[in-house]
Image (cartoon, helix red, strand yellow):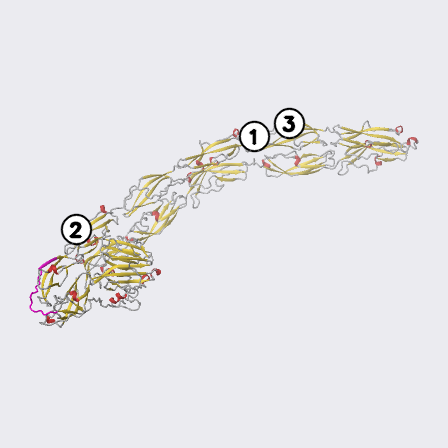
Amino acid sequence: MKFLLSLSLLSLPCGVLSAETVASCVNTLSVDNDPNTCSASITETQINDGSTGSNIMLHLDHYHLQGGTSAVTLHATGDGGVAGCALVDTCQTQVTVNDIESPIIDCNSHVTYDLDSTLYTPLTASTLAISWYDNCDWNDITVHVPGGIPTFGCQDVGTMQQVTVEATDLAGNTATCDAYVDVQDAMYSCSPTIASCLATETFVADPGCCEKYIDQSDALDNGSTGEHLSFMMFNNMPRVGTTTIETEVNGFGGTDKCSTEVTVVDDQPPTIHCLGYAHYVDLTSATPLGPYDLAHASDNCYDTITPTSVSFQGGAVPTFGCADVDTTQTFTMVATDASGNTATCDQDITISDWSFSCNPTVASCVSDLTYDTDPGMCSKDLTGLENDLDNGSTGEAISKWIDYATADVGTSTKTLRVYGSNGSEQCTTDVTINDNEDPTISCYTDFYYDLTSYTRMTVDNVISSASDNCWSGLTKSIQGGVPSFTCADVGLTTTVTGVATDASGNTATCDTTVTVIDSYDNCNTPSVGNPTVASCVATKNYDADPSMCEKDIYSMDASTFDNGSTGDNIMISFPDWTNPKVGTTAISVQVHGDGGTDYCETQVTVNDIEPPTISCWDQSIDLVNYPFLNEGCMVSAYDNCDIYSPATISVDGGMPTFGCAHVGTPQTVTMIATDASGNTASCTLTVTVSDDTYSCSPTVASCVSAKTIETSQGSCYGSLTEDELNDGSTGLHLSFMQANTAPYLGTQTITTEVYGSAGSDHCETSLTVIDVEPPTITCHDYNYDVGGTAYFGAYTSFASTLASAYDNCWLYGTPADAVDFQGGEPTFGCADVGTVQPVTMTVTDDSGNTATCDSQITVSDDMYSCKPTVASCVSSLTYDADPGSCSKDLTNFVNDFDNGSTGESISKMLTNSWPYVGTESLTLEVTGYGSPYMDQCTTEVTIVDTEAPYISCVSDITYYVGMSAPLEYWDIISSWGDNCCGDTTTTLQANDVSFGCSDIDTTHTVTGVVTDGSGNTATCDVPVTVLDTTGCCAVIGTVPSPPPGPSPTRDEVNPPGPSPTGPSPTGSTQSNGDPHFTTWTNEHFEFHGQCDLVMMSDPSFADDIGLDVHLRTKLVRFWSYIKTAAIRIGNDILEIEGWSDANPARYWINYEYQGELNEIGGFPVTTTPRGGKERKYTIDLGSKYPGQFILVKVFKEFVSVKVMNGSEEAFGKTVGIVGDFKTGKTLARDGVTVIDHFAELGNEWQVLPSDNKLFH
């Protein structure tokens, strides 16, 4: 029930009217629009033009007029001079509302424009301006560029060009903004790639290297032009010398090549190392002195230093003689590399004569020497007396010794052997040994000579013993002869002297006292019988007893010596007991008889028939070091008569001599021992003749003069065995060594050192190493892009990228020009795309050896240059605006625009997918993999508003005649709205609805009408009860005061809508500024009111950090919009408020106004201003939910929140006013009850005290 009251008056009878009520209006009125609206507010004062009456009250039927001209009725109510009476008069004024407010236009601060029309469509005013808005009608604004769209050229590339865009509304008001155009040349048609290289360039090789590493790929550039240039050098390590290097210049404008003659100079001296110690040179060595014996050299170009590159300073190899022996001389060695760089070092050479050729061994002896025998010896030991024999022998480190160092008495020739480092020699000396040593003698002290004992006195009765250093020839005798005694001497004592005489006449004596006795007293007894007469045989001949030098005769019968002795009772015996020695000895025979004793002698000859004993020992001699046999070391002999006369030793045939013919062959020598009796014995010994210094086998080198060999497998070096170059070298135990056993490709002189037992020698060979080994080539299967910029496409014009090669003689990788196409470089085009083309690659090494392989080239169009992106649009399309919206979301209608766009893997999008009601040109942007990758076309799109506005009327009205003003639409219509905000006309079906006395006590129906800008209407009816409480309709009477009624209220009622159970979730939801809500299933609805709403909430969001989105709406008359949005993620709260000007931004982060805003809940936040009235906040959820965003837009005072690409993983558990993600149902807080009435849904999801507090 609605009550309309103008005044509360007492009821009085009208009586006679004293003043007429007359309404008077101005004819026309012109007013300007209210700020930010297309309407103007007017007052009674502006319309009234002198209305008269008693106690009049003025009232207009419209206080708020839309733009244009419309009639306004002024109601004048007076009492005619009668208290309590109500008299009404009206008049009209034509009121024109002038739109004097300029539109609002916002330009794009960065518009990309490419000179290639295939990439971007030509500029239009609509692409230069982001948005435009007018207080009257957004769709009635003309946007253009004054003076026309400018054209741009190459001179503008890279600059930002300012373009002024003008917006004009229907009233002719204008506004301008400046767009900034970034002029680009994406295809770089203004910047073609042109390669320019230096014609020549010289570098110095890197330290320690034979190459120059060119680390900057543009080092050879000479002003190449193009855009975003990059350089690729196909040999960035050229070797010393001159090399042609090709540089490829790649730019956004294509690829070009150029080449440079690069010379790399080697200015680095080689490294030379002398031995660091003195080198010894022997004068007689068979090895000549070479410079490589003294110094070793290396070079950064290591293959250019060989042993022949090292020389003596001055060139000549020095020679030395005996005068240089034992001197140390310093020589400067020079190493020279292929570039002529040199290095030197000093080397000491000590000259030696290890074989002592300058100091040969020469023996020299004295002619004769005389010595006495050694004490107690019959000889002289000459050991240690070699220097006595020496008469100035010379040589190096000589030593001397004497053959048969024992010299017997007498004169003998002795040999002095002289050994030196340079061989041996001998000489002789006659050595005389004199025996000047007396014998040793001993006599008996007393000897009793008994005249009757039949004992004859002999020398042995006197001398008890005698010895001599020389036994041979020692004799014993009695001085003056053997004495004879008679009876006259009985009792007398006589001294007898014994004498010992040796062979040299040396004597010794001793005395014996001889006493003559006659024990049988024969001297006093006369003789009986015949006298005794002894007679002996004259001679006897015996052989010496075995192993003895005498004959035992005393064991014989003495009578065998008798030769007719006479006498009585004679007995024959030997008076002496000394056995005769070898030779002839007088043996005394005693004959004793009754007639006395007589003596006779027999010459006994003892013969030595026993040969001596001899033993031989094998001997070894060396022809140089020990060339002589030493007899004393060869044999030993013993004879039974040695004590008297040692056996003599001789060599059968004489002492032999040996030479080279005897080396290695055993030689037999017979030794003979001969005793004094001429008995002989012999033995043989073996002499091993050696040549330890190999004087019989000198080392003589002989090489082939020239030889050709092939390189070893996989190497650029040949391989020599030790004796491969030998050509009959002679010597003993030969071995071979080359100074270079791995000669490099080409011709060189190889020195072969021949080592033998007798020294070394060398010879030279001219060796040629040839390479017959083909290189190795490996092909690579590649993709060739006909567009020339993807994968290997930019490089396949170079053979080296299709094949890699290796050769045994490439020390530094593949030369840039080694690999080539067989038959020339192929070309490919669009016709070949998708095919595999075989290409034969070939490689040739420096020796002319070749190898080939096949590379399979897959021709592709990776940049899709054969499939350019071409956009094609239909000319026009018409759509109805989305329910509850003044625009159409064309996000899912992109394919409607396409009219056969072509390209590879194209995707399509509209640059503006939310056009408003009206007709505008929309751009379809087609993006593909082709070149150009993007194209655009346009379609004229008409969005038609077919949705009726929303209207809600009061339930009923009581109209009091005389007290109520005529009904206006706001009396009837409690609220209204339209999907196109601000574009509605609100009227009553009948103008100037008023009632009089005739209508008292009747009920009338008044219809309220809302018409939107597209002519859609909505109506609602209100019953009006007419009453007369003032008595104006009665002559006399009273009308009770109206009963008290409820205060005016507005019921906000939304028609029920269908339950959102059909479509599947779209992955996005949003709440726009004019509070239009979109569920997860893309269903739109409205809820008007001023309150805080829960858009969505999920405490488990992003691993339980939680998400809340709250919206705060603001009520303006009969509609509301979203003024503020607050978002909580985790512990962070971001609150964003709309404002008439988007600058500065109005936001709070964790309740701090304009605090530092980089992230919320760990998710990055970016803010983008778009002109002066629009700003965008993007929360990127991609770190947890790839590709998903929460987007908050602010346009002036309007705020919208939109979820982009939401997934069930992220938003599947959210609850709130936008419904359930999975089912799309609009559920109550209990999660079960479905609320289909949106007014109830809005009330259900108002923020409660139990919800999280987000707003500051």
Q: Nearer the viewer, residue 768 or 1191?
A: 1191
Q: CA distance from mark 2 to mark 1?
A: 121 Å
* Vertical position of residue 72 compared to residue 793: above or below: below
Q: Is residue 370 magenta?
A: no
Residue 252, image x, y percentages: 28, 48
Tags 2 and 1 touching, CB below 8 Å? no
Name the side, left or right, on which 52 lies relative to 519: left
- For label 3, the residue is 366
Q: Amino acid at mark 2?
A: Pro
- For label 1, the residue is 359
Residue depicted at x 29% and y 69%:
1233
Residue 790, image x, y percentages: 31, 51
Q: Is residue 1026 visible?
A: yes
Task: Tell me where the magenta segment starts and ends, as one range.
Answer: 11-30
Q: Quadrant of residue 77?
A: bottom left
Q: Is residue 29 magenta?
A: yes
- Dot in front, 2 or 1: 2
* Residue at disc 1, secondary structure: loop
Q: Nearer the viewer, residue 428 or 649?
A: 428
Tags 3 and 1 touching, CB below 8 Å? no
Q: Nearer the viewer, residue 263 or 797?
A: 263
- For label 2, the residue is 146
The prevailing secondary structure element of the residues shown in magenta is loop
Name the side, left or right, on which 1151 lies relative to 128: right
* Vertical position of residue 1234 compared to residue 379: above or below: below
Residue 864, image x, y percentages: 28, 53
Q: Quadrant of residue 478?
A: top right
* Residue at disc 3, secondary structure: loop
Dot 1: few (<14), some (14–19), or many (≥20) neighbours within 10 Å?
Answer: some
Q: CA distance from mark 3 to mark 2?
A: 142 Å
